[in-house]
Image: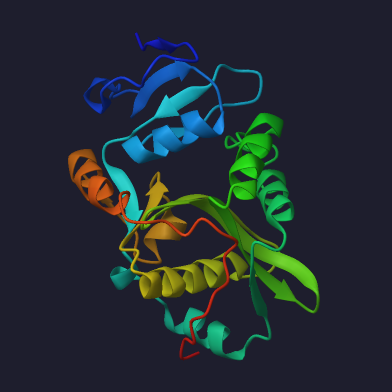
Amino acid sequence: MIPWLSPETPFPSLSTALEVPNGLLAAGGDLSPRRLLEAYRLGIFPWFNEGDPILWWSPDPRMVLFPSELKISRSLRKTLKNIDYEIRTDSAFLEVISACAASREGCAGTWIHEAMVAAYASLHEMGLAHSVEVWMRGELVGGLYGVAQGRMFFGESMFSRVSNASKIALVHLVWQLERWGFSMIDCQMKTAHLASLGAREIPRNEFSQKLKELINYPGRVEKWCFGHEPAK
């Protein structure tokens, strides 16, 4: 059994999370900014289907990407050099999250529903949730969104409408976060897509220890503007 959270109930210890399904910690509560930010500070994230109770997760192991371990394949590096694209940040947050939701229609990951969109839109208005966007000829063709606290970025979802667009967004995100002193990106669950870019699993205890350090740095509570000049 997992605990049911009332609006004022604190999260239980991560050590109580279930092994099957991996990381299920609690149910209930709400998606208020206060609750969401506390969850991220503890290494917890919400993931549930529309119409179901809110479910909170902290899997073990945890998929993360260390910026210094970013892998750029030869073909992706060629794309980064030769494709005519523009990177924008925080210019179309709702479009990005809606595109991420649409890309999962009919799939198991139908968790980006109206309540989640509203919750992350609130964090975006507070300067805490951000989008990285790939534009080509004036059209949004790919991107990602997530939450930043301290020097931690918690990735939520990404989408592509043309080949490699989400990878382009992630590479530019990693380049900029490294410049800002971020040293870990939370990827939540293992996927082949993220593994191909250098993400890997680490034990939950190790993740929590690193998180406690990084979360306490002063954050960039503002609309993001990337200033890196990567060697494309």
Is residue 231 visible to us here? yes
Which quarter of the picture shows residue 121? top right
Give the quadrant of residue 198: bottom left
Reply above or below: 9 against 171: above
Nearer to me, 205 or 62: 205
Where residue 49 sits: x, y (%)? 60, 26
Q: Position of residue 132 (x, y in %)?
A: 59, 64
Q: Residue at 56% x, 29% y: name it.
A: 32
Q: How is the image coloured?
A: rainbow
140 left or right of 48?
A: right
Q: Is residue 65 left or right of residue 210?
A: right
Marks counted in the figure total 0
The foreground one among 204 and 150 is 150
| 171 lies above or below 130 | below
Quadrant showing the N terminus: top left
Examine the image and state in which quarter residue 8 appears: top left
- Give the residue displayed 74% in from the left and 54% down from the top: 95
81, 150: nearer the viewer = 150
Query: Does residue 71 appear in this view?
Result: no
- Residue 187 drawn at (x, y percent): 41, 50
